[in-house]
Image (tube, rainbow, N blue to C red):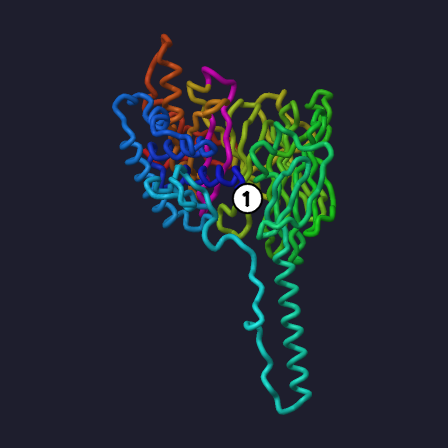
């Protein structure tokens, strides 16, 4: 199963309201995910060491079992509530019972598709097909028979067509392999230069490949972001394939800008999405691409034929993106997160797809992109840097946003190396801050950083309050986002 899909599901659970007050269970779930590839050899002692680093001598395997049972019930409650529509379930097998193959159950955590979410349409059996009734008139009887044959033939072709539509993918050597709903290969494309090993494919393709009906004809197109293995001075390429694997068009991100100081216009796509069709507009493609090695970022809107319709430029990296209807007007907005280089802070930007133009306004002229006009973002936020981040790194970074029922959730990485030291944020549909809190990883790393320093201090309530001072540059009536918690 795609590890990125599992990671996305884990993040969805960790950011959920169900787990908002369950810091210990969130930490346990993160530990289990981190060890998924080696869970057959994972021992309770290792879990104790990571879950209770300061209480190793007092904790036993029974304590781990208790926490596992608590997490199991918490996951059940989540999937019975706000996670009932999720297509992927995270399950904790009972390790005291045999595994499905009859051997001893060694797995700690299992990810599997939700029942009813997999498999393609089933072909109707012969005895289920409608049989024409006998008529007293031969002409009518013949007409009915012809009609039935036509309907059955159409349905059979339709079912077969849907059944063979692209749905899944995998990388196999230098080939992109596309599969149908049953996992059967439909077609493949070989790329002689291979795929970049340290680029967009190392963690999967969840934001670099898309399946869907771009033209409203009931046929699945495939959008694929390709970055070659020999990636030096090479931009990524967005390729559109038909359901049968025929290449329809290619698109290259970016353009030459004076702010790039003479460097080639090398842009690499970090995020890809498609806006849902509305009564007035067909589907539109949204692509966020980052210059390498400088800071300009392009968010481009394309039509179904790969033509650039409009573009927005940001002074920094918007590496993550979600498309969602925030205000319930039936039209999706663009929610992008990443880093703003002008302020060296994590940022969140919300764009109206019908008003994607211009460049972000920066206070320092050396980070201002000129000649594009003034952008009109719906919202532009900056997230505060913790003392931990200021002591060790040059900036913090906002990670993958998720939007459910108008609520925006995201994490801000305060450590630019694993484990990330995340701070969790949640906003309501009016873009007011519901919560902003430091996770267990942040707190434990804060302790480690300051334990042997002259300025040693615990993570205080005042520092927690500072993390809630999210600054609003565009889209708010005040400098800081209104906070609904006290």
Q: Position of residue 205 (x, y in %)?
A: 59, 38
Q: Position of residue 200 (x, y in %)?
A: 61, 33
Please check the rendered image and state whether residue 391 is part of the magenta-colored stretch, yes or no.
yes
Range of the magenta residues?
390-413
Q: Nearer the viewer, residue 208 or 188?
A: 188
Within the image, what quadrant is residue 123 found in?
Answer: bottom right
Which residue does the image show at 67% across and 58% down from the upper left? 217
Q: Nearer the viewer, residue 272 or 360?
A: 272
Which residue does the image show at 27% across and 28% down from the upper left? 60
Residue furthest to the front in view is 102
Please check the rendered image and state whether residue 425 is part of the magenta-colored stretch, yes or no.
no
Asked whether the viewer can see residue 140, the reply is yes
Q: According to the image, label 1 marks what residue?
A: 323
Residue 296 vertical position relative to residue 177 in the rendered view, above or below = above
Q: Position of residue 485 (x, y in %)?
A: 34, 35
Which residue does the image show at 67% across and 44% down from the upper left? 302
Within the image, what quadrant is residue 372 found in?
Answer: top right
Q: Position of residue 283 (x, y in %)?
A: 63, 50
How many numbered discs, if any? 1
Within the image, what quadrant is residue 263 found in?
Answer: top right
Residue furthest to the top in view is 454
Asked whether the viewer can see residue 478, the reply is no
């Amino acid at each position: 199963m795609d590890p990125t899909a599992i990671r996305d599901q884990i993040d969805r659970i960790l950011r959920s309201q169900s787990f908002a007050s369950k810091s210990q269970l969130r930490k346990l779930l993160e530990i289990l995910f981190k060890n998924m590839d080696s869970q057959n050899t994972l021992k309770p002692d290792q879990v104790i060491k990571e879950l209770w680093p300061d209480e190793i001598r007092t904790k036993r395997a029974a304590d781990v079992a208790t926490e596992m049972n608590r997490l199991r019930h918490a996951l059940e409650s989540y999937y019975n509530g706000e996670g009932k529509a999720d297509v992927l379930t995270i399950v904790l097998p009972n390790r005291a019972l045999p595994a499905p193959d009859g051997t001893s159950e060694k797995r700690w955590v299992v990810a599997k598709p939700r029942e009813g979410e997999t498999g393609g349409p089933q072909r109707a059996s012969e005895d289920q097909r409608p049989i024409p009734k006998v008529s007293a008139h031969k002409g009518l009887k013949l007409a009915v028979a012809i009609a039935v044959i036509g309907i059955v033939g159409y349905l059979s072709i339709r079912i077969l067509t849907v059944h063979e539509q692209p749905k899944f993918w995998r990388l196999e050597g230098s080939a992109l392999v596309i599969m149908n709903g049953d996992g059967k290969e439909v077609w493949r494309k070989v790329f002689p230069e291979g795929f970049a090993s340290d680029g967009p494919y190392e963690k999967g393709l969840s934001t670099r490949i898309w399946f869907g009906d771009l033209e409203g004809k009931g046929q699945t197109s495939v959008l694929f972001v390709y970055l070659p293995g020999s990636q030096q001075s090479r931009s990524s390429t967005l390729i559109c394939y038909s359901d049968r694997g025929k290449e329809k068009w290619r698109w290259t991100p970016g353009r030459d800008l004076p702010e790039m100081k003479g460097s080639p216009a090398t842009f690499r796509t970090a995020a890809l999405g498609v806006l849902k069709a509305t009564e007035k507009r067909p589907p539109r493609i949204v692509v966020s691409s980052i210059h390498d090695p400088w800071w300009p970022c392009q968010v481009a809107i394309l039509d179904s034929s790969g033509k650039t319709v409009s573009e927005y430029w940001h002074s920094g990296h918007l590496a993550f993106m979600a498309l969602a209807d925030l205000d319930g007007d039936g039209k999706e907005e663009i929610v992008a997160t990443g880093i703003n280089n002008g302020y060296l802070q994590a940022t969140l930007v919300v764009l109206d797809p019908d008003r994607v133009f211009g460049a972000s306004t920066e206070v320092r002229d050396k980070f201002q992109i000129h000649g594009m006009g003034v952008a009109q973002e719906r919202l532009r936020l900056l997230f505060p840097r913790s003392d931990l981040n200021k002591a060790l790194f040059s900036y913090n970074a906002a990670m993958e946003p998720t939007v459910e029922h108008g609520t925006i959730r995201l994490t801000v990485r305060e450590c630019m190396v694993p484990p990330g030291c995340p701070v969790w944020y949640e906003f309501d549909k009016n873009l007011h801050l519901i919560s902003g809190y430091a996770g267990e990883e942040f707190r434990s790393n804060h302790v480690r950083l300051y334990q042997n320093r002259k300025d040693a201090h615990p993570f205080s309530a005042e520092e927690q309050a500072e993390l809630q001072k999210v600054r609003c540059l565009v889209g708010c009536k005040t400098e800081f986002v209104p906070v609904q918690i006290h």
